[in-house]
Amino acid sequence: MSDEHESPIITTERLNKMYGSHLAIDGINLEIPRGAIGILGPNGAGKSTLFKCLLGLITTTSGEGTVLGHDIRTEGESIRSKIGYMPEYNALDPNLFAVDQVRYAGELLGMNSKTATQRAHEVLEYVGLKDQRYRKIETFSTGMMQATKLACALVHDPEILICDEPTNGLDQRARSFMLQTLKRTVVEGERSVLMSSHVMDDVQEVCDSIVMIHKGKIVLQGYFDDFAEQVDKEIEVVIWGGASRMEEELATDGLEARRLGRVIRIKVESESTVDKILNAAVRAEVQVRQMKEYEPDLEDIFLLVMEKLGSEIKGSSELMTPEHTGES
C-alpha cells in the first residue's frame, strides 16, 4: 500500500474556534484515516463547527489542520473541490427533474455542462434512481430525495464524502439501500466517508472507526473493535415467567444487571457468574429461554463514555441536534 493511502486524510492540531466568548472547538487534535468514519456527539458538541473549519468555510481562531494535504486556513477552495457534502437539510429544487438538479450541482462545482450531464446520469444510476431521472423532485419520496442529495454530493467524484444524517426519514428498504451504497463507495469506490448520524446501528454498519466529540473536545477516537474490548463483559439471558423476580434475585446475589423487558444483561464478575445466574433463576422460578455472551454495540460504548463524562444523556435519540445552528 502506498504512503498516500497510509497517511491520514484529515489532521488537526490544537484546533480552536471561538464564537464570541463561546469556545465551540477546544484544542482538537485529529488524525482521521481513510475508510468510513462515524462522527458522533451529543447536542451542541461542535460537530458542525468542526465540519465548517475542515471545509474552510469559517476561519479557525487558532491551531492548524489539513484535509488531503491542503491547509484548512488557506486552501479551502481546493479542499471543497475534493469533498462531497450531503446535508441533513433539504437543499433540492422541487421544480427540477432529478437529472437537472444533479447536473446543476456539478456545474456549481466547476464542471462543464456536457461532463456534468454525463456524470449526473452515472451517479443517479449508482444511487438507484436510473428510472426516475426525468421525474420532478416534488414527486419524490423521502428516500428518493435522500438518494438525489447523495447523487449531488458524488457528481464530481470526490475523495471524501461527508454525510449528515443520510438515513433520516427513510423506511427500512430505503435505509438498507442507502447504507449499502455508502459501503460500496468506500469498498469498491475506494473513497472515504465521514458519516454523522443519531442512529447507532447505521454508523456501526457502515463505519469501522469513530470520532466522538463532547463540549468541543475529542473524547474518543479510533477503531470500534478496540473500544468494544473495553466495555464490561455481560451475559444476556431471555427470561420467561417473572423477569422482575429474576431481577430481584440477581440483586440479592450482588450481581449488576440491566433489564430490557424479558431480556436481562448481567455483568460478568467472575467465573462463577453463570452459576449464580442459573441459581437465581431457580429461586425466582423462571425459565431461561436463552443464555449467551452479549456483544457490546456502539450505543453501549457511547453511553459508557457519556457516563464517565458525567453526562445526563440516556440514549441515542439525544445524540444529534435535529437542526444545526452556528453553535452546534
Image (spheres, rainbow, N blue to C red):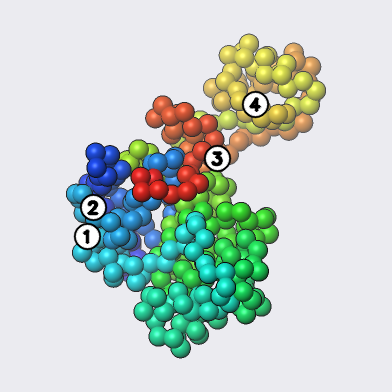
CA separation, marks 1 and 2?
7 Å
Q: Amino acid at mark 2?
A: Thr
Q: Secondary structure at mark 2?
A: loop
List the residue tagged with mark 3: 317
What is the secondary structure assignment of the residue under circle 3? helix
> x%, y% of residue 140?
64, 67
Residue 259's label in the rendered image is: 4
What residue is pinned by disc 1? 73
Can you tell which quarter of the image residue 275 is in? top right
Which residue corresponds to mark 2?
Answer: 60
Question: What is the three-letter code of the residue carrying label 3?
Answer: Ser
Q: Is residue 7 among what the camera can see?
A: no
Closest to the observer, 288 or 9: 9
> Considering only order in the chain, which callout, 2 or 4, is on the residue closer to the N terminus?
2
Residue 43, x across and y down, in percent: 44, 40
For the point 58% across and 30% down, the residue is 234
- The vertical placement of 86 against 196, above or below, is below
Side of 255 where 29 appears, left or right:
left
How much space separates mark 2 and mark 3, taking CA atoms?
30 Å
